[in-house]
Amino acid sequence: MAAAKANFEKKEYKAALAAAQDVGAKAKELGTAATAKKAELAKAWEEMSSGVPKLAEAIKSRVDLLSQSKRLPAGLDKAKLDGAKSGLAQVNQSWTEASDAFKSGNVTDAVAKGKAARDKAVEIMTALNMTVPQAASK
């Protein structure tokens, strides 16, 4: 549209008309692309909304169990356990922010924050020598 207007102001009417005629097709392409992106984000959110809370719950369960143990397993020390505890708080905070963004209609932000929560959860699970579900590694 900007090109059509610029050509019109330069009194290049043929070029302005040609550019203006392309606007409808380009708008339709943009609409199709936006619909596809919205569907992609909705699918990503759906997958995360069922997976991230389960990851957080698994981490919490493991952290609780390890906190009650008299001895930590090989390769795991108090610093790693404390890091997992604070990391779990970060996961929960990020997930709350993601959920709030989704509820307010900002799916792009929700997916970004959800991915951050998922990535942090995977990092914690790895540090705690937990098995990371294959779906969470995406």
Image (cartoon, grey):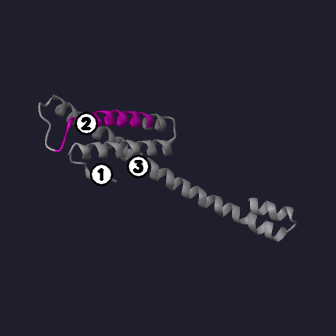
- In the rendered image, residue 16 lying in the magenta stretch gets the answer no
Q: Is residue 8 above or below residue 66?
A: below
Instruction: State how many labels appear.
Output: 3
Q: Which residue is mark 3?
A: 44
- In the rendered image, residue 89 lying in the magenta stretch gets the answer yes
Residue sitting at x 41%, y 37%:
94
The answer to whether the residue labelled 3 contacts the one labelled 1, judged by CB atoms less than 8 Å apart, is: no
Residue sitting at x 74%, y 66%:
19
Residue 67 circle label? none
Q: Amino acid at mark 1?
A: Ala
**Residue 120, x across and y down, in percent:** 34, 43
Q: Which residue is mark 2?
A: 79
The quarter of the rendered structure image containing the N terminus is bottom right
- Residue 45 vs residue 63, the one in the foreground: 63
- Residue 88 vs residue 16, the one in the foreground: 88
Q: Is residue 124 left or right of residue 36?
A: left
Q: Amino acid at mark 2?
A: Ala
Q: Which residue is mark 1?
A: 135
Magenta span: 75-97
Which of pointers 2 and 1 lies earlier in the amino acid sequence?
Answer: 2
Res. 18 image quadrant: bottom right
Farthest bottom residue in view: 14
**Residue 50, x across and y down, in percent:** 33, 42
- Residue 118 vs residue 128, the one in the foreground: 128
Q: CA distance from mark 3 to mark 1?
A: 11 Å
Q: CA distance from mark 2 to mark 1?
A: 28 Å
Q: Is residue 65 left or right of residue 34?
A: left
Q: Label 2 crowding class (10 Å Cα cut-off): few <14, some 14-19, many 20+?
A: few
Which of pointers 3 and 1 lies earlier in the amino acid sequence?
Answer: 3
Q: Is residue 115 above or below residue 11?
A: above
The answer to whether the residue labelled 2 contacts the one labelled 3, judged by CB atoms less than 8 Å apart, is: no
Helix, strand, or loop for circle 3? helix
